[in-house]
Every structure is written in structure tokens, then in C-alpha cells.
Image (cartoon, rainbow, N blue to C red):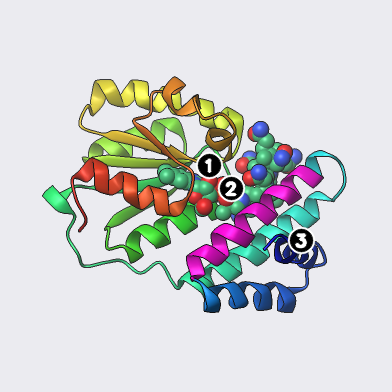
Amino acid sequence: MLARLDEFERALLALDRVRVSELLDAVAASQTPLLAVESLIRPALERIGKLWEDNRCALSQVYMSGRLCEEQVDALLGPAATTTRVAPGNARLALTVLEDYHLLGKQIVRTVLRAAGWPVLDYERQTVAGLVTRTCADEIDILMISTLMLPSALQVREVTTQLREQSPRTRVVVGGAPFRFDPELWKEVGADAMGTNAAEAVAIVEGLAGGAP
Ligand code: B12
């Protein structure tokens, strides 16, 4: 698998769309599309982020790798259709990216939640103020927040503080690179749970809502 990951990373950096797609399709066919995302796309993008940090690739390569992966995620996991199923206890769910432009993780989490039957509102990208207002207005029970930048992750503290006052029913679940790098950070920002991947997002939501839809 490591050799395949090396090759996938090289194909992304070379913007070789055909090879990128072939490598993903091979894993999706022999295992599952979600495993192709989790075992190739996420680790390869993490490596490319590290290369950029070390000045060993250009930001344009990071950008284009992200774009290529976005296309592939849509092709692999299908469009994020809405579901007609009802959540246990009519729990209301929303998903957002907070003060951040890294949207791919949210896209994957949303698609996997909907595929598992969870009706989830997509708030796209939000500021702290916008997110608190919308969460209260929609009477959200489970708010899922994705952040990839450390400053954005720290802003979650402001959201949980305000929600505790204005919408105590809302449970907050966080995910994204800063929370994977520092496994205690979710507690420090006042979240109720943290997930490291999309499959965990489903398990956490089931735990909080008390069952599957
Ligand atoms: C691709 C990428 C970009 C693309 C984004 C394209 C897009 N549409 O998303 C572009 C080129 C635009 C970009 C821009 C920038 N980036 Co950037 N980027 C990345 C990179 C390489 C990959 C991110 C990614 O898509 N990963 C793949 C997805 C699938 O993984 P994921 O988001 O982690 O999601 C998974 C899990 O975390 C989890 N999950 C995610 N969210 C949630 C939520 C919940 C509730 C749950 C349960 C689970 C969950 O499930 C997902 C599926 O497994 C990362 C490196 C990294 N280590 O992550 C850097 C990285 C995040 N970027 C970084 C930086 C610095 C920037 C820029 C500031 C660069 C610049 N100087 O302009 C800008 C800022 C943009 C902004 N203001 O938001 C830094 C952040 C450093 C920090 N400590 O804050 C990183 C870590 C790179 C690095 N090593 O330095 N970037």
C-alpha cells in the first residue's frame, strides 16, 4: 500500500489526472471507495502539505492536488444527495467549515453522512457570528465543524462559549488536521467530541443521537 501511496503522491504532484484516477479506482474496486479516499487522498495531501511547508513543492501544486482530489471524491463517492430518512428523535444536524478555505474534508464527511442516511444541512463556510446565528435559528442538535488551520480550530472555543449561552441543546463535534495533530485540542476548545475521519463522524453522530436513521 505504501508503494501505491508513493505513486499516488507523485501522480498528484505531476498533475497526472489519468494515473490519479487509475490508482484510486483500483483500491475502490478491490476494497471500498471510502477506503480509497482515506488510504490515498488524505495521506497523500498530508504529505504534499508537509512538502510545501518544507519548501519542497509549490503552493500551485498543493492547490492543483486539492482540485484533482475534489473531482475524484465526487466521482468515487457520488453526489452528496439529500436523504429522505429521518434521524432518531428528529435530531437536526449541520456541518460547516469555520473561518477556513479547506473544504475537501467537509465535502467527504457530508457525503458519507448522507450516504449513511443522515439528513445534514451544509452551512458551507461560516464566520463565528454567522455560525452561531444560524445554529440557533435552525435549532441544531449536532453541529459538526471542520477546520484545517490552527487559528481556525482555536476559533471553535468562541463558538462553543456562545452556544452554551444561546443554544445549550447543541452538541459540537470537530474534525480536521489540527485536531488530529493535537489529540487534546477538542477538549480545550469546548467541543463534545472529535473525529479523525468520515467513518468516525458517522459513529459519533449515532452515539450522540442514540441510533442510526
Ligand atoms: C489542499 C490544501 C490546500 C488547498 C485547499 C483546497 C480545498 N478546496 O480544500 C489550498 C491550496 C486552497 C490551500 C490553501 C492554504 N493552505 Co492549505 N493545505 C492543503 C493540504 C495539503 C490538504 C488539506 C486536505 O484537503 N486534506 C484532505 C482532506 C480529505 O483531509 P481533512 O480535511 O483532514 O479531512 C479528513 C479528516 O480530517 C476528517 N474531518 C475533516 N473535517 C471533519 C469534521 C468533523 C466534524 C469530523 C468528525 C471529521 C472531519 O475527515 C476527513 C476525511 O477523512 C493541507 C495539509 C494537511 N496536513 O492537511 C494544507 C494545510 C492545511 N494548509 C496550510 C496553509 C498554511 C494554507 C494557506 C495559509 C497557504 C497560503 N500561504 O496561502 C492557505 C490558506 C487557506 C485558508 N485561509 O483557509 C497548512 C495549515 C497550517 C496550520 N498550522 O494552520 C497545512 C496544514 C499545510 C502545512 N503543512 O503547512 N491549502
Q: Earlier in the sequence, mark 1 or mark 2?
A: 2
Residue bounds of the magenta highlight = 32-51
Q: Which of marks 3 and 1 is nearer the N terminus?
A: 3
Depth order, front residue of 96/210? 210
Q: Is the shortest distance between ligand 1 and the CB of mark 2 under 8 Å? A: yes
Seen at 79% across and 39% down, the residue is: 53
Depth order, front residue of 14/39? 39
Seen at 72% across and 55% down, the residue is: 63
Query: Residue 163 has which mark?
Result: none
- Mark 1, Cα crowd under 10 Å, few <14 / some 14-19 / many 20+, is many
Left or right: 173 in relation to 27: left
Left or right: 121 in relation to 145: left
Secondary-structure class at tag 3? helix
C-alpha separation, residue under disc 3 versus residue under disc 1: 23 Å
Q: Is the shortest distance between ligand 1 and the CB of mark 1 under 8 Å? A: yes
Answer above or below: position of 52 versus 181. below
Answer above or below: position of 123 versus 25. above
Seen at 50% across and 70% down, the residue is: 33
**Amino acid at the residue labelled 3:** Asp
The residue to which callout 3 is attached is 6
The residue to which callout 2 is attached is 102
The residue to which callout 1 is attached is 176
* Ligand 1 found in image quarter: top right
**Residue 115, quarter of picture:** bottom left
